[in-house]
Image: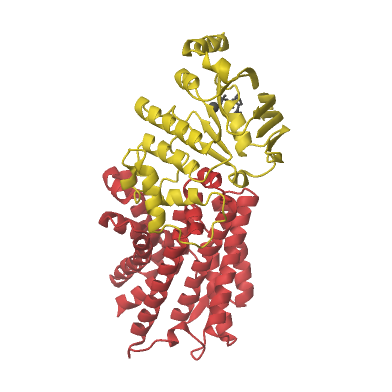
């Protein structure tokens, strides 16, 4: 049961990890906006559900808000030429106030009788199984959508822009414009995680996004390393691997917590896990070659 | 026709010191002509190509393609007309995309990139067919990331990509300089064939005297950002690699 909860949370955070995969892996853009856009998705969901909105409107609004946040970061980076980290930190910092203004106070619970994505499927008696099923369906859809997108001409332009911007421009791609669109899509995904987690937990908190970037980063790297070690390189497998990475990461954390570690150490633990994974290639090059990290 | 009219380009160092990379260059390149440019290091050859492709902006002058001013358009808009090959074989392809994905981008160079899945069976066999003619075995690597190809293979692929959709102008900046002699010959021969086949207007910058003598129908020598020699096909035909070497000796003096 304990692990099941970890798996559902890992899946709910999978959209965030897909967003980070887009910004970091497609565009080589370490996007700190995520801390803010994830919370933005969450607070809009909480306020929307309290106000009695339907689930579709709530989802659309949360996603679009996230996309605006990504657009802001993208425009600051491409138009004003601020570096990626600074652009993201500026938007993230600004979003803190916006999120607090939307939420009204630091923590808002979602009413039990409000709309929820988890109300659609309930073949099982156990609530957690139903949640798991819903999340699996959502992730199948998101992985299929992202795989399709990255294989279209537009997606090829996105990938080329991140991979070799000069070449992309040479083939008629407005690399800066497409980077802004890409960051919008990434933060839309990230806001969807906020939307899901708030419904899973039953509340939104102004600090729910603190350190979430590192969590996403760790999941992306775990997922990619797994797929690389297995030698699976197909696009949908890589993308699915990111969601699996998210689940594995949550499981590691639950495992440690169940061993009796005080929850206040979660963030430190997260940072250490990511450091170890990112640091291994530097320390032991032979492993580094197999898991291929920048 | 490509017209370069009074084009100058300056660079300023951090200390404000001015370098003149190009100084009032005038050139008319006829449709279907193949111009070879030689000249010492820093004579402004790459700068000229960068200005035509839009990687740099002109400080003075204008560039007209078939009467249309293109020098104010951003590089990605000029991609409709201008294709490029660089010295670095890695520069012209996206390394993490597969070979066929790279070709797909090349196929839509002039078009908006929409939500279309363009890599179908027909497209694959079209690309494979073109790659087979290279006899480098590339048709078997359609699904490999381009990073796994050798420099020569990448440069040959870049050339095919650059001309997959016929460009109005093909710019080549020392395309064989980073390759082993055999790959260099294959790539240059391929370039010559494609240019002749499609009747392209092309510019080749090279340091290889044999290439400069063998290819093209016009030869320009650059020095200090100016054109100091301009030989037509007849005059160029009489040249020997030794004559070019003498020019360069003068450059060094
Ligand atoms: N991006 C740049 N910044 C500053 N100076 C440059 C830049 N590009 C070229 N230059 C200078 O302009 C001159 C011409 O360079 P270039 O066109 O690259 O020469 P070539 O290709 O003939 O060797 C050289 O003096 C070079 O140092
Ligand atoms: Mg040069």
Q: Quadrant of the N terminus of chain A?
A: bottom left
Residue B187 found in image quarter:
top left
Quadrant of the displayed image that contains ligand 1:
top right
Residue B96 drawn at (x, y percent): 40, 49
Residue A68 drawn at (x, y percent): 60, 65
Residue B107 drawn at (x, y percent): 49, 50
Q: Residue at x 63, y 34 (%)?
A: B51
Tally of numbered discs:
0
Observer-nearest of A112 and B44? B44
Observer-nearest of A36 and B94? B94
Q: Colour of chain B?
A: yellow
Q: Residue at x 26, y 57 (%)?
A: A230
Chain painted red:
A
Residue B53 drawn at (x, y percent): 60, 38
Q: Residue at x 32, y 69 (%)?
A: A251
For residue B253, say whether it is visible. Answer: yes
Q: Residue at x 28, y 45 (%)?
A: A284
């Amino acid at each position: 049961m304990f692990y099941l909860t970890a798996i559902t949370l890992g899946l709910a955070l999978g959209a965030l990890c897909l967003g980070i995969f887009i910004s970091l892996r497609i565009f080589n853009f370490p996007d700190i906006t995520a801390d803010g856009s994830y919370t933005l998705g969450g607070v809009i969901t909480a306020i929307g559900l309290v106000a009695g909105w339907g689930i579709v409107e709530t989802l659309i609004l949360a996603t679009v808000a996230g996309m605006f946040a990504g657009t802001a970061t993208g425009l600051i980076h491409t138009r004003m030429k601020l570096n990626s980290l600074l652009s993201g930190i500026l938007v993230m910092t600004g979003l803190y106030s916006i999120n607090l203004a939307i939420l009204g106070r630091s923590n808002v619970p979602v009413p039990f009788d409000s709309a929820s994505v988890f109300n659609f499927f309930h073949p099982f008696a156990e609530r957690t199984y139903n949640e798991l099923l819903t999340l699996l369906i959502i992730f199948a859809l998101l992985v299929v959508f992202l795989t399709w997108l990255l294989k279209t001409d537009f997606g090829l332009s996105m990938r080329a822009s991140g991979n070799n911007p000069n070449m992309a421009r040479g083939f008629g791609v407005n690399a800066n414009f497409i980077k802004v669109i890409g960051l919008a899509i990434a933060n839309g995904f990230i806001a969807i995680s906020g939307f899901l987690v708030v419904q899973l937990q039953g509340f939104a908190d102004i600090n729910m996004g603190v350190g979430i970037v590192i969590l996403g980063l760790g999941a992306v790297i775990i997922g990619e390393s797994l797929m690389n070690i297995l030698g699976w390189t197909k696009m949908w497998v890589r993308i699915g691997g990111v969601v699996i990475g998210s689940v594995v990461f949550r499981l590691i954390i639950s495992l440690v917590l169940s061993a009796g570690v005080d929850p206040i150490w979660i963030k430190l633990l997260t940072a250490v896990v990511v450091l170890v994974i990112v640091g291994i290639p530097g320390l032991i090059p032979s492993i580094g070659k197999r898991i291929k990290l920048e | 026709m490509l017209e370069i009219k009074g084009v100058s380009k300056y660079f300023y160092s951090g200390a404000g010191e001015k370098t003149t990379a190009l100084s009032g260059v005038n050139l008319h390149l006829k449709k279907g002509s193949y111009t070879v440019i030689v000249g010492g290091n820093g004579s402004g050859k790459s700068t000229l190509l960068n200005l035509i492709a839009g990687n740099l902006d002109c400080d003075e002058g204008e560039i007209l393609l078939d009467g249309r001013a293109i020098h104010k358009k951003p590089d990605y808009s000029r991609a409709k007309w201008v294709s490029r090959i660089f010295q670095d074989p890695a520069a012209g392809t996206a390394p993490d995309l597969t070979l066929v994905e790279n070709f797909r981008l090349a196929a839509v160079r002039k078009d908006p990139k929409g939500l279309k899945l363009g890599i179908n069976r027909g497209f694959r066999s079209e690309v494979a067919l073109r790659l087979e003619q290279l006899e480098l075995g590339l048709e078997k690597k359609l699904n490999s990331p381009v990073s796994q190809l050798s420099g020569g293979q990448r440069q040959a692929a870049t050339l095919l990509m650059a001309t997959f959709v016929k460009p109005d102008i093909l710019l080549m900046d020392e395309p064989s300089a980073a390759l082993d002699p055999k790959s260099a010959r294959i790539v240059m021969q391929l370039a010559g064939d494609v240019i002749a086949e499609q009747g392209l207007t092309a510019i080749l910058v090279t340091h290889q005297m044999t290439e400069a003598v063998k290819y093209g129908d016009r030869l320009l020598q650059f020095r200090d950002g100016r054109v100091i020699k301009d030989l037509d096909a007849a005059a160029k035909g009489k040249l020997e690699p030794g004559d070019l070497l003498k020019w360069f000796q003068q450059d060094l003096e």
